[in-house]
Image (spheres, rainbow, N blue to C red):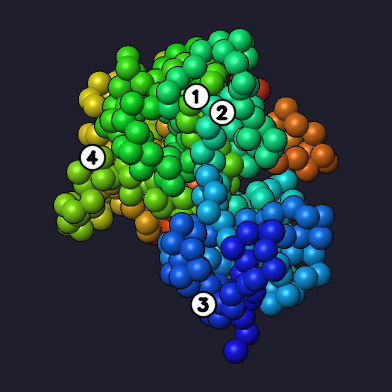
């Protein structure tokens, strides 16, 4: 039976043999050791560190009570030098995941996506060269799988980027004297995601980090919460923080670039992948839980067909308006009447209710349709298997890019945020349909009603 040698620290020659176990996951058998076996060596153990050839300690991933083992360089797992991790951080590597291609109602939609920059960038990541059958595999440890929460005594935050590229040296940064800082808190938690004050970027930036660090908001109710200072602070974001027990007046700190924030205990969950299904599912459960929805589901209530309306008055960035909106709406209403659905026309600028009512509204959605926009992020409150229809605007001059990315050179094949709603929907195990639609010189569009009708007939 294979085993690894586990040392209580890197100064000792004595080790304990821990048997390797295996868990089947999709195409893989993942090797792991139970945490309880490590605690038999040291009750304070929280994980394992692997010493690589450069003498650096590489954290092995933890999921619940299992420590997953990963091969680094050309060192076999059984030959690794493993040291118990009893230190001030929690880390794990989540399993690889797949993102399926969208559903297409016609060849026009399919051809647009197959010529898009997203497909050109990612199609080589499809197992067995079959994107249609297997989807795109995401398995980069740093970018997609590795989650880390650091707990730093006398920690110092200096406007570092809050994401998976957060450097170890920056995470471990400390202050020695008060003059190193502009302010010192007893405890603080960092969520300095760009534009995290806005509804859309709270959900796609802060949400995944909260999904695995929310417990520390409760454990340290006096801890300050550090977010980026913005042009505004969206009411819906403020209300979500409040439901999480974080009151703006007493706990939230709006960070600006000239601040040097010190904390006697600085909690840093920033090194988190932007996308992983587990993080997004857990974040969604969190929104449901704080809205008291988790235990009240009734399938008979899930009859909402929600059209997320974009208008000249509610669009923060302008354009992307449907010019033939009335016949478009008539077609949606006809579909709802035929299928006994509640047609709901949602305009966020007219919604004065508390965010918990919106969470419940989308929790009971069966279908959601809308033009690419931040308001479509409300899909984060909808259940798995909810049908999402995204009308994807593009310019004829840059037809391989979503309109929101048309400032890029299509030949550069850069990552583009225009595909983020498609990605979110697939992470949430929803049924995603794409309807690419060309815009005019003003950035607005006439939706092809025959194509829309054909799509609705396929649902």
- Mark 1 or mark 3: whose residue is earlier in sequence: 3
Question: Which one is in front in this view, the residue at disc 3 or the one at disc 2?
Answer: 2
Q: Residues within 10 Å of mark 1 (few under 14, many from 20)?
A: many
Q: Position of residue 424 (x, y in %)?
A: 50, 47
**Residue carrying label 1:** 263
Q: Is residue 59 above or below residue 370?
A: below
Of the numbered discs 4 and 1, the one sitting upstream in the chain is: 1
Look at the numbered discs 1 and 2 and tell me whether their residues touch, using CB distance below 8 Å: yes
Q: What is the CA distance from the residue labelled 1 to the residue labelled 2?
A: 5 Å
Residue visible at 38% across and 39% down in the picture = 216
- In the picture of the structure, the residue carrying the numbered disc 4 is 291
Is residue 300 rendered to the left or right of residue 457? left
Alpha carbons under labels 4 and 2: distance apart = 34 Å
Quarter in which the N terminus is drawn: bottom right
Answer few, some or many: residues within 10 Å of disc 4's Cα (few below 14, many 20 plus, some between 14 and 19). Answer: some
Question: Could you say whether the residue bearing mark 4 is in a helix, strand or loop?
Answer: loop
Q: Are marks 3 and 2 in contact (CB under 8 Å)?
A: no
Depth check, mark 4 against mark 2: the one in front is 2
Say which residue appears at 54% left-offset and 41% top-offset. Answer: 150
Judge from the rendering whether residue 341 lies leftward or rightward of residue 375; answer left or right. Answer: left
- Dot in front, 3 or 4: 3
Question: Residue 219 appears in which quarter of the rendering?
Answer: top left
Residue depicted at 83% across the width and 41% down the height: 411
Reading the image, the residue beneath label 3 is 23
Q: Where is the C terminus found, in terms of image quarters? A: bottom left
| Residue density around tag 3, few if under 14, some if 14–19, many if 20 or more, within 10 Å | few
Which numbered marker is on residue 253?
Answer: none
CA gap between label 1 and label 3 equals 40 Å
Residue at image mark 2: 155
- Residue 251, given in percent of the width and then of the height, sits at 36, 21
Residue occupying the point 33% across, 49% down: 285
């Amino acid at each position: 039976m294979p085993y690894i040698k586990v040392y209580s620290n890197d100064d000792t020659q004595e080790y304990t043999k821990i048997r390797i176990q295996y868990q089947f996951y999709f195409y893989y058998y993942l090797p792991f050791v139970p945490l309880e076996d490590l605690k038999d060596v040291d009750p304070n153990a929280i994980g394992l560190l692997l010493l690589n050839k450069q003498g650096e300690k590489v954290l092995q991933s933890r999921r619940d009570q299992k420590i997953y083992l990963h091969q680094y360089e050309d060192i076999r797992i059984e030959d690794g030098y493993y040291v118990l991790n009893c230190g001030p951080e929690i880390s794990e590597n989540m399993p690889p995941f797949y993102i399926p291609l969208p559903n297409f109602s016609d060849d026009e939609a399919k051809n647009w996506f197959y010529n898009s920059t997203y497909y050109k960038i990612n199609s080589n990541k499809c197992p067995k060269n079959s994107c249609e059958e297997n989807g795109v595999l995401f398995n980069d440890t740093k970018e997609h799988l590795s989650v880390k929460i650091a707990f730093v005594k006398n920690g110092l935050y200096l406007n570092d980027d809050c994401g998976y590229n957060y450097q170890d040296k920056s995470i471990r940064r400390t202050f020695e004297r008060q003059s190193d800082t502009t302010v010192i808190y007893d405890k603080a938690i960092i969520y300095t995601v760009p534009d995290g004050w806005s509804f859309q970027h709270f959900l796609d930036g802060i949400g995944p980090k909260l999904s695995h660090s929310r417990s520390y908001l409760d454990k340290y109710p006096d801890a300050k919460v550090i977010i980026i200072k913005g042009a505004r602070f969206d009411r819906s974001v403020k209300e979500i923080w409040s439901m999480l027990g974080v009151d703006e007046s007493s706990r939230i700190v709006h960070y600006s670039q000239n601040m040097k924030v010190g904390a006697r205990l600085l909690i840093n969950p920033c090194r988190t992948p932007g996308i992983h299904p587990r993080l997004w599912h857990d974040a969604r459960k969190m929104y449901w839980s704080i809205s008291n929805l988790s235990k009240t589901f009734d399938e008979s209530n899930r009859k909402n067909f929600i059209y997320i309306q974009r208008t000249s008055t509610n669009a923060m960035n302008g354009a992307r308006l449907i010019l033939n909106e009335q016949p478009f709406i008539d077609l949606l209403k006809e579909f709802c009447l035929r299928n006994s659905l509640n047609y709901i026309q949602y305009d966020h600028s007219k919604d004065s209710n508390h965010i918990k009512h919106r969470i419940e509204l989308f929790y009971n959605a069966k279908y959601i349709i809308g033009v690419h926009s931040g308001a479509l992020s409300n899909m984060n409150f909808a259940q798995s298997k909810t049908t999402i229809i995204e009308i994807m605007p593009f310019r004829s001059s840059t037809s391989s890019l979503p309109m929101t990315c048309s400032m890029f050179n299509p030949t550069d094949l850069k990552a583009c945020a225009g595909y983020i709603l498609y990605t979110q929907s697939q992470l949430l195990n929803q049924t995603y349909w794409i309807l690419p639609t060309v815009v005019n010189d003003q950035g607005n569009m006439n939706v092809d009603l025959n194509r829309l009708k054909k799509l609705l007939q396929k649902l």
